[in-house]
Image (cartoon, helix red, strand yellow):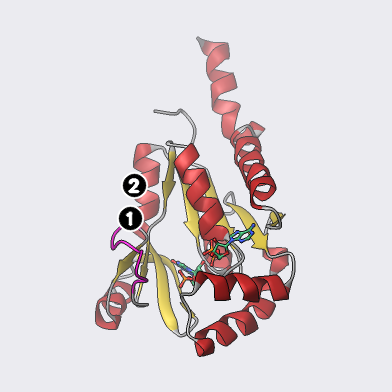
Amino acid sequence: MKNTPPLLLIVSSPSGAGKTTLCTKLLNEFGDLRFSTSHTTRPPRPNEVDGQDYHFVDTTAFEKMVDRDQFVEWAHVHGERYGTARTEIDAATAGRTDLIFDVDCQGARQIKTQYPEAVGVFVLPPSIEELRRRLEKRGTESAQSLDRRVEAAIKEIARHELYDYLLINDELAAAYDRLRAILLAERARHDRLVGVAEKLLVD
Ligand code: ADP
Ligand code: 5GP
């Protein structure tokens, strides 16, 4: 068990820019990193697993959690509800595992307000045309949903100032190298490891 508080790493991007791809690679490489599994009212995609990619719930169940104040943050995104349960942060704090959040810019702002030490990474596509191409290639959206996501991307990109890091996902391997560099550098920050240094002085 580590001796430092968990790092809260927010990874946001407009839909289709590649944050799921990048986060999955990071989670596969770093066993001591936990994914914050959000709740959503959106239906699962064919390859998605309930409880792993998301907790898939209906609107009634989601609203019940809102009423009981069980979310750290929640938001309407692309016509559906998405939220981060408080239990996700509690579990990371108890287990002292670093936690990665895949949330939109509304979620990033709400988490940063409550946890100013959280670190925000904004994944950007090299161009809007490439974003559309990636969404089309992924094949998960109807034409209407695709247009809505591209339109929303422009508004989300305008919120770039919320984040500590901007990560252009041009070439996947190079973008991934930069993401892991951010994780490693953030884990080595003085204010995260000060307890370790001070413990050496009293031992
Ligand atoms: P997001 O989670 O941001 O919505 P995904 O990770 O699902 O995006 O990526 C959208 C699509 O783009 C997927 O089909 C993925 O394989 C592809 N993709 C991700 N990164 C790159 C990249 N650097 N170059 C080309 N295609 C990519
Ligand atoms: P998707 O439907 O493509 O999985 O996700 C759509 C958007 O919802 C993405 O921008 C994703 O980051 C965001 N999202 C996923 N989970 C949460 C959450 O718990 N809270 C917020 N605010 N956004 C979320």
> Quadrant of the rendered structure where residue 65 is?
bottom left
154 sits left or right of 56 in the view: right
Furthest residue in direction top, as rendered = 203
Q: Nearer the viewer, residue 173 or 191?
A: 173
Q: Is residue 139 above or below residue 177?
A: below
Let me know if residue 169 appears in the view: yes
- Residues packed near mark 2 inside 10 Å, few (<14), some (14 to 19) or many (20 plus): some
Residue 53 x %, y %: 37, 60
Residue designated by label 1: 87
Q: Secondary structure at mark 1?
A: helix
Q: Residue at x 74, y 64 (%)?
A: 126
Residue designated by label 2: 91
Identify the disc placed on residue 174. Answer: none
Q: Residue at x 33, y 55 (%)?
A: 87
The span shown in magenta is: 44-52
- Residues packed near mark 1 inside 10 Å, few (<14), some (14 to 19) or many (20 plus): few
| Residue type, mark 1 in image | Thr
Residue 74 x %, y %: 44, 72
Residue 195 x %, y %: 54, 26
> Quadrant of the rendered structure where residue 97 is?
top left
Q: Residue at x 56, y 86 (%)?
A: 148
| Residue 200 magenta | no
Q: Secondary structure at mark 2?
A: helix
Main SS of residues in magenta: loop
Q: Residue at x 61, y 36 (%)?
A: 184
Q: Nearer the viewer, residue 113 or 103?
A: 103
114 sits left or right of 181 in the view: left
| Residue 46 magenta | yes
179 sits left or right of 9 in the view: right
Q: Are marks 1 and 2 in contact (CB under 8 Å)?
A: yes
Q: Is residue 200 above or below residue 149?
A: above
| Residue type, mark 2 in image | Ala
